[in-house]
Amino acid sequence: MPLQFSTEIVLLSAIDMADSQFRISDSRSLTPLIDSIQAVGLLVPPLVIPMDGDRYRIVSGFARIAACQKLAVEDLLVRIAAADTSATELIRAAVSENALARELTVMEKARVVMLLQKGYPDPKALTDVVQSLGIAESPELVAKLSRLAHLPVFIQQAVEKGVVGLAMALAMGRLESDAAQRLIQLYQMLRLGLNRQREVLTLIQEIAKRESLPITAVLDADEISAAIHGAAEDRARRRSLFLNYLKKRRYPVLTQKEELFSQLRQRLKLGPKVQINPPPYFEGGTYQLVLGFDSLDELDQRYRKVGEIKLDSNLIKWLG
């Protein structure tokens, strides 16, 4: 059954701007909305519900009402839902209006789930109503959105800003608050993508576990500070220095072997289109020699180069 409402003009001062019980949308710039209202007026009246003392609670239209407030509007046309309208109906209306303009963000979907949990404490019933609203397709995603809705504000803000996604936000929620805040700041400074974020978190957690240190102590390393705050380096270079330090600290023996093998490559003077690759993680004894050529003459050149490499004392010593 469609939501029942009346349409009336009310004083803006009668609308409780501080009551965010039904707020779903992320905070964003009001400038485009203010310009639109100035040009063509308020096309879609906000939806409110009456409260005690001739006051109104906003259900949908927080940004529209805030824009009108900026424009010093004294009264405006609103849709007033019946006082006995169920919370679920009101949430459905709020979701529908937000979804008409654009797809809801992850954080907005999490807020919807949190609102619905009050009326649907049973996980199965909650999942059914969330699915009916098109918010999430599986019980697993509903559970994740619920967890996100209850994470600290600074993690939710990082999701809103696009610094971290849902999976990483949930991972941050399992950490101590100080550690999570510092990692999020680091991700933002270095602009790390999801895969790099996962890699960094795994390396740091493994270092902390192996060295019996808190994560914050690992992040206190001078080398990390120098890498991420290097004024003379571009961001890509800072990312590389940072990751190399973590790998070296986490895998000191492997890192040393990689450095020595890199030096071997340089001493062999392989030239163009010739590569020699070690076994993965230097485990096992099979090396790969890759040759590239565009003609028979180049093939002859590569063949002679293989002969030189075979007799090189550096390679003989390495393979020992």
Image: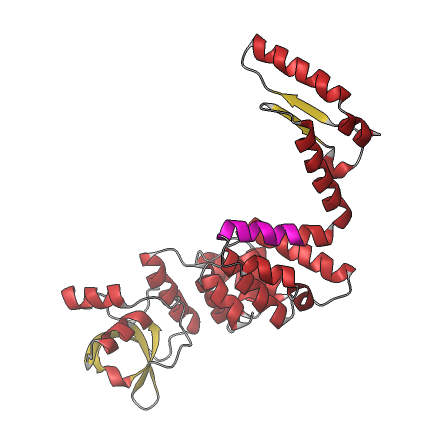
- Disc tally is 0
Answer with the quarter of the image where residue 305 lies.
top right
Q: Is residue 260 left or right of residue 102?
A: right
| Residue 235 counted in the magenta span | yes
- Residue 11 position within the rendered picture, expressed as x and y whole percent measured from the top left: 22, 83
Check the picture and name the quadrant holding the N terminus. Answer: bottom left
- Residue 191 position within the rendered picture, expressed as x and y whole percent measured from the top left: 50, 55
Check the picture and name the quadrant holding the C terminus. Answer: top right
Answer with the quarter of the image where residue 314 lies.
top right
Q: What residue is shown at x 24% (from left), y 82% (from top)? A: 12
Give the camera-side residue of 255 and 137. Answer: 255
Furthest residue in direction right, as rendered: 320
Per the rendered image, the range of residues in magenta is: 234-245
Give the camera-side residue of 262 and 160. Answer: 262
| Residue 41 counted in the magenta span | no
The colour scheme used here is: secondary structure
- Residue 128 position within the rendered picture, expressed as x and y whole percent measured from the top left: 52, 59
Q: What residue is shown at x 51% (from left), y 70% (from top)? A: 154
> In this rendering, does residue 7 appear at all?
no
Give the camera-side residue of 196 and 286. Answer: 286
- Residue 56 position within the rendered picture, expressed as x and y whole percent measured from the top left: 32, 82
> In this rendering, does residue 55 appear at all?
yes
Answer with the quarter of the image where residue 124 lies.
bottom right
- The chief SS type of the magenta part is helix
Give the camera-side residue of 141 and 51. Answer: 141
